[in-house]
Image: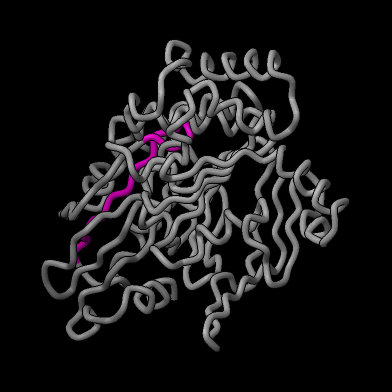
Amino acid sequence: MITTTDLTKVYRSRGREVTALDGVDLHVREGEVYGVVGQSGAGKSTLIRCVNLLERPTSGTIAVAGQDLTALAGRGPRAGSALRQARSRIGMVFQHFNLLSSRTVRDNVELPLEILGVSGRERTRKALELLELVGLGDKAKAYPAQLSGGQKQRVGIARALAGDPKVLLSDEATSALDPETTRSILQLLRDLNRQLGLTVLLITHEMDVVKTICDSAALMRGGRIVESGRVTDLLATPGSELAHELFPVGGEPSAADRTVVDVTFQGEAATKPVISQLSRTYNIDISILGAAMDTVGGNQVGRMRIELPGRFEENVVPIGFLREQGLQVDVAAIADGPRAAAPTTQLLKEGAK
């Protein structure tokens, strides 16, 4: 549904150049909720604003529903009309709501329909229908100042749906909301995704957002996508940064001659007493350094960091036992004198060998 190819955006100011996007390839399937995460300055907002050409890319292409939007970015009335029509099929939800304070809730939702030239009666019918859909049917005559933050965002979502879009873009739509309101807005987005068949592309810096509603995700850093894929696949990928961020588990080796491994459980494996079986089978004492469990995509997923006595070479068989149970096992650290201070990525490579 959304494809960007070698997308680049360079800002030029006072003789300086800043590369916000550096060759981004993004592929979002129809009907999925796709999250883009990363720290401030990673290029997330620039990426999502390029998808509907609120920002014109310096180079590369953007296709939505099979239509190359960058080919519509030329000058002249004909090109402008084609681009406006394409944009009407892409809804946008903003972080700070962007509602017009002088208009009622219903009038705010009607605004894009007004721009598209829809008749007054049809605009009203559609706006009231959308307000019912987002749970604000009784707020049509209210003004934005009379609404809570969550209600304002629901108005913003209703407005974004006015043109019957195939794609909904969400630019940090929950970052200004409290945790409880955030959960309700995320549930609304998931419900709309399922009821309307919407493809949702959202950016966020909150891993809980990805964990709660995203089917797929991408991690951005320095204007590039450094990791992407379906969330369930990423959780089963050795050394995945996103999996580590989604389920952080702390803990370092307690002493020399110890091996620390991260074990990821999914589905039925999450309910099996595998760690106790391991301890009994090999008569070893296992220390649990940290653990986290949650539901991702309707499946129970957990991550646990455990410490095994002895060096890695002495734990090949116990680690093999865990893998035979269908678990993802990553060597996190090997405490053996000075090697314990080595970077985790180096230790992972050493452990794999």
Q: For the point 52% across and 85% down, which residue is it? A: 14
Front residue (pair 255, 219):
219
- Residue 10, x across and y down, in percent: 60, 75
| Residue 71 x/y as whole percent | 83, 59
Q: Is residue 297 magenta?
A: yes
Residue 158 visible in the shown view: no
- Asked whether the viewer can see residue 95, the reply is yes
Q: Is residue 48 left or right of residue 298?
A: right
Image quadrant where one finds the C terminus: bottom left
Residue at x 25% of width, y 53% of height: 282
Is 102 within the magenta? no
Which quadrant is home to the N terminus? top right
Nearer-the-camera pick, 318 or 7: 7
In the image, taking residue 307 as reference, residue 120 lies left or right, namely right
Q: Residue at x 43, y 57 (%)?
A: 242
Colour scheme shown = one colour
Q: Residue at x 73, y 33 (%)?
A: 116
Q: Tell me: residue 148, above or below residue 265.
A: above
Segment tinted magenta in the rendering: 295-309
Please identify the residue farthest to the front as the structure is shown.
102
The chief SS type of the magenta part is strand
